[in-house]
């Protein structure tokens, strides 16, 4: 009696709301405290651990009945991904975008430079794109690179690298190392601050960023102020529990990860630290790190293992566990709003690297 009655529309739709209600009941009224004068029941917990916008995106993708990428040839998969990218939001405006080439390990490769709309010179972030060492190029993470540029206030360079299966391991890693050295050497030409360089990467690009910091330590420069690793691939030698728990239904699947590895490196090569940076003999004396892992990602546990190994080796490391997120949602600028706070945390971490 006296309780106000209002209409509260649920934007997820009646069917989605009904399923959530049914699940709550089936799990003993999860998330509810029930009480009357004679007794009380509390079943605390999260009803749906997926963020709402992530869940709705997955439902929309399921309705499209898209072919699994691992069912396609690499050329067809690349065409499919390029067509999909054409429909995404463009990301924020930056001060300047420049496309050019740099000297890779075996010939010139493309890069795209994003400059802030503010007086320079700025520090530099060298970024490596995702795509399982098979898909993507220097433009494929364009909205995310724009977002990083604006949030950090730094020049971001997305450097391409050679891809499998045409160029197998260690071609991509060799190109990543060549990229970091080339951009460090050409800092003055690019109008960035010499000596203030951070490496960053998402997924396979996170693998390349992690590998590059190890090789720079072992093979002689340049100085790197920090490493930003976003849902990185760190160990292809073993399947951890998240590979089973998140095997399918969350965009990146275990089957697709197997497809990527198969096009990049032979089984015996996957224990090489240049393919699996978690297996390095030592992680000591590496640059400070920020590692971002997503709850519903097959790669979650190997990313977490790498963060823990860095901490154990004495490397200043932040590990951000992103609840309710997928492998692909952290970089989905203006598509997944709930991951915006994590992107700001990435920018904050990189700014700390430069300040340090």
Image (cartoon, rainbow, N blue to C red):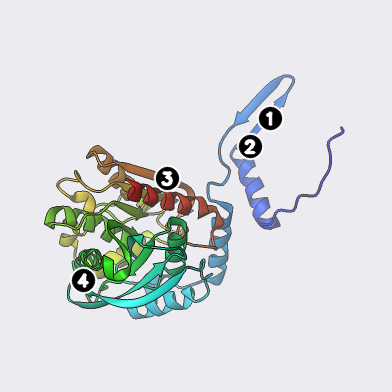
Residue nearest the viewer, comparing 138 with 240: 138
Q: Residues within 10 Å of mark 3 (few under 14, many from 20)?
A: some
Disc nearer the start of the sequence (2/4): 2
Residue name at image x 20 percent, y 67 percent: 178
Q: Secondary structure at mark 1?
A: strand
Q: Report the side of 270 relative to 76 (left or right).
A: left
Task: Please tell me which of labels 1 and 3 falls first in the chain.
Answer: 1
Quadrant where the N terminus is found in the figure: top right
Disc 3, SS: strand
| Residue 168 - label | 4
Give the Cα separation between the discs numbered 1 and 3: 31 Å
The residues tagged by marks 4 and 3 sit, at their Cα atoms, a distance apart of: 31 Å
Q: Mark 2, residues whose alpha carbon is within 10 Å: few (<14), some, or many (≥20)? A: some
CA gap between label 2 and label 1 equals: 9 Å
Residue 160, compared with residue 311, is above or below; it is below
The answer to the question of whether label 2 and label 1 lie on touching residues, with beta carbons closer than 8 A, is yes
Quarter holding the C terminus?
top left
| Residue placed furthest toward the right | 2
Q: Which residue is mark 2?
A: 29
Q: Which mark is residue 321?
A: 3
């Amino acid at each position: 009696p006296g309780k106000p009655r209002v209409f509260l529309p649920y934007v997820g739709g009646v069917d989605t709301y009904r399923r959530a209600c049914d699940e709550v009941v089936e799990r003993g009224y999860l998330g509810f405290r029930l009480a009357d004068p004679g007794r009380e029941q509390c079943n605390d917990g999260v009803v749906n651990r997926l963020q709402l916008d992530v869940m709705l995106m997955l439902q929309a993708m399921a309705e499209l009945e898209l072919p699994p990428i691992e069912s396609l040839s690499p050329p067809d998969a690349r065409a499919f991904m390029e067509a999909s990218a054409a429909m995404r939001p463009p990301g924020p405006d930056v001060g300047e975008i420049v496309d050019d080439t740099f000297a890779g390990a075996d010939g010139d490769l493309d890069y795209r430079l994003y400059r802030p709309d503010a007086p320079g010179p700025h520090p530099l972030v060298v970024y490596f794109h995702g795509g399982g060492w098979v898909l993507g190029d220097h433009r494929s993470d364009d909205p995310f690179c724009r977002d990083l540029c604006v949030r950090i206030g730094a020049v971001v360079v997305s450097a391409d690298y050679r891809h499998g299966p045409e160029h197998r391991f260690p071609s991509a890693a060799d190109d990543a190392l060549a990229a970091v050295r080339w951009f460090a050497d050409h800092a003055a030409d690019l109008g960035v601050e010499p000596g203030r360089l951070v490496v960053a990467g998402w997924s396979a690009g996170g693998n390349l960023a992690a590998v590059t910091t190890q090789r720079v330590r072992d093979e002689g420069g340049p100085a790197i102020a920090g490493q930003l690793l976003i849902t990185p691939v760190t160990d292809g030698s073993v399947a951890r529990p998240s590979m089973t728990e998140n095997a399918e239904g969350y965009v990146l699947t275990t089957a697709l990860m197997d497809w990527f590895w198969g096009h990049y490196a032979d089984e015996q090569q996957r224990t090489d630290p240049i393919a699996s940076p978690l297996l390095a003999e030592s992680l000591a004396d590496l640059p400070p790190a920020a590692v971002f892992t997503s709850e519903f990602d097959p790669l979650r546990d190997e990313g977490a293992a790498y963060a823990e190994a860095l901490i154990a080796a004495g490397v200043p490391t932040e590990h951000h566990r992103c609840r309710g997120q997928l492998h692909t949602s952290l970089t989905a600028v203006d598509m997944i709003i709930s991951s915006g706070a994590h992107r700001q945390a990435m920018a904050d971490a990189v700014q700390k690297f430069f300040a340090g």
